[in-house]
Image (tube, rainbow, N blue to C red):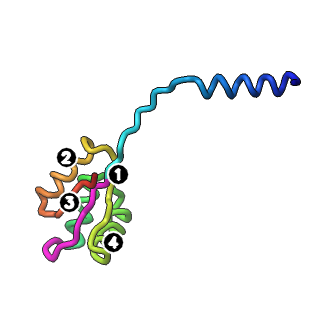
Amino acid sequence: MNNALRNAATQWQTDANEATDVIEETLHNLIVWNDDVNTFDWVIESLVDICGHEPMQAEQCALIVHHRGKCGVKKGNFNDLRPQAEALIDRGIQATIDY
């Protein structure tokens, strides 16, 4: 076996036998649901204020909510999304976090 093959085989064995700790964090979606109460402007303003959306992004989300019935407006870990969902709900906007 030449040196290049021996080194490649040794490297492969080392990598295969190493134990690695990987922390996987589950990402959730903050979902806004359509209703017959809130105006486009209110939803857009709320997404900008609460979720940090740019106005164009918030407008696009509002249109998706209107036409499809819901839209995932933000992705993140549950603890970050929960206060945003609660703030949207406090403004009368139906919002949930998926699991």
Q: Describe residue 45's horizontal placement relative to residue 20 as left or right.
A: left
- Distance from the alpha carbon under mark 4 to that under mark 3: 14 Å
> Which numbered disc flags the more N-terminal residue, 1 or 3?
1
Identify the residue under disc 2.
83
Task: Measure the alpha-carbon separation of dots 2 and 4.
Answer: 23 Å
Q: CA distance from mark 1 to mark 3?
A: 13 Å
Label 4 and label 1: CA atoms lie apart by: 16 Å
Question: Along the horizontal axis of the image, is 20 left or right of 76?
Answer: right
The local secondary structure at tag 4 comes to helix
State the residue at coordinates (37%, 39%): 25
Taking the image as shown, residue 49 lies to the left or right of residue 9, namely left
Task: Name the amino acid type tagged 4.
Answer: Ile
Badge 3 amino acid? Ala
Label annotation for residue 64: 4
**Mark 1 Cα-neighbour bin, 10 Å: few <14, some 14–19, many ≥20:** some
Marker count (numbered): 4
Boundaries of the magenta span: 29-38
- Residue 95: image tag: 3
Q: Amino acid at mark 2?
A: Pro
Pinpoint residue 2: horizontal percent, then vertical percent: 88, 24
